[in-house]
Amino acid sequence: TRADAGRLGSELDGARGEIAGLKETLEAARGENAGLKAALEAARGENTKLREALEIAAAEISRQKGELASAAEALEGSRKEAADAKGEVKRLAGELEASRGETARLTGELEYARGEISRLAKELDSSRSDAAGLRGELDAARNENGRLRSELEAARGEAGRLGSELEAARGEIGRQKEALEAARAENARVADWLLYTS
């Protein structure tokens, strides 16, 4: 009938409209899918870059850890060397202090010997026998005393490294001992002469 035909025509038109709507929805879904694929590829590329950066960072961290371990080992070695150096300085300071005490003692004895020489020189000047020869010996003794006094002042003025100062002090001690022995021998000789001439 015409009524059925009209109804079917309306349903057909409705179905066609629905198909058209579905086609549009499908096209939109396809476009969105393409966009999502592009975003996925970009994310994958970014992920690859991040992995590469992470590997580089891990290698750098490993390298820095190695450098840190080497620096820590070097620091420990420096600390040990510093401790050894402090011990050596303490030892040398003790030896230097003992050497200074010995120098002071010998200096006192040397000053006493110089006083004795001066006293004997006055007595020698008052003596009239063999004055010329004795004056020559006395001048030699005074020159020797002046040289020893200069060496002693030079030794006191040294303030360098402890090791070299210690060696200089030891050398000074040896020279002062020789000077003291020479002064004592001179005192004994002059005293014998005075006894002989008196």
Image (tube, helix red, strand yellow):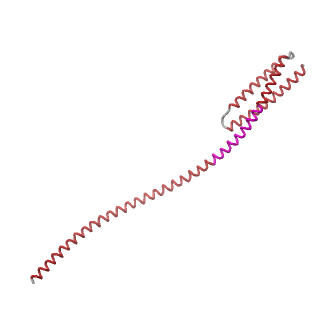
Query: Residue 121, image x and y in percent?
Result: 82, 20
Q: Is residue 40 left or right of residue 2?
A: right
Task: Tell me the magenta residue range.
Answer: 80-106
The N terminus lies in which quarter of the figure?
Answer: bottom left
Q: Is residue 196 left or right of residue 98?
A: right
In the rendered image of this protein, does residue 16 appear above or below residue 178?
Answer: below
Residue lying furthest left: 2
Query: Residue 148, image x and y in percent?
Result: 75, 27
Q: Main secondary structure of the magenta part?
A: helix
In the rendered image of this protein, does residue 72 appear above or below residue 13?
Answer: above
Q: In which quarter of the image is residue 138?
A: top right
Q: Name the foreground residue: 175 vs 112.
A: 112
Q: Which residue is drawn at 31% across and 65% down?
A: 36
Residue lying furthest bottom: 1
Q: Residue at x 46, y 56 (%)?
A: 57
- 162 falls in the magenta region: no
Query: Residue 173, image x and y in percent?
Result: 76, 33
Q: Which residue is drawn at 74% across and 24% down?
A: 146
Q: Name the foreground residue: 111 vs 72.
A: 111
Q: In which quarter of the image is residue 187?
A: top right
Q: In this view, does 144 lie to the left or right of 1?
A: right
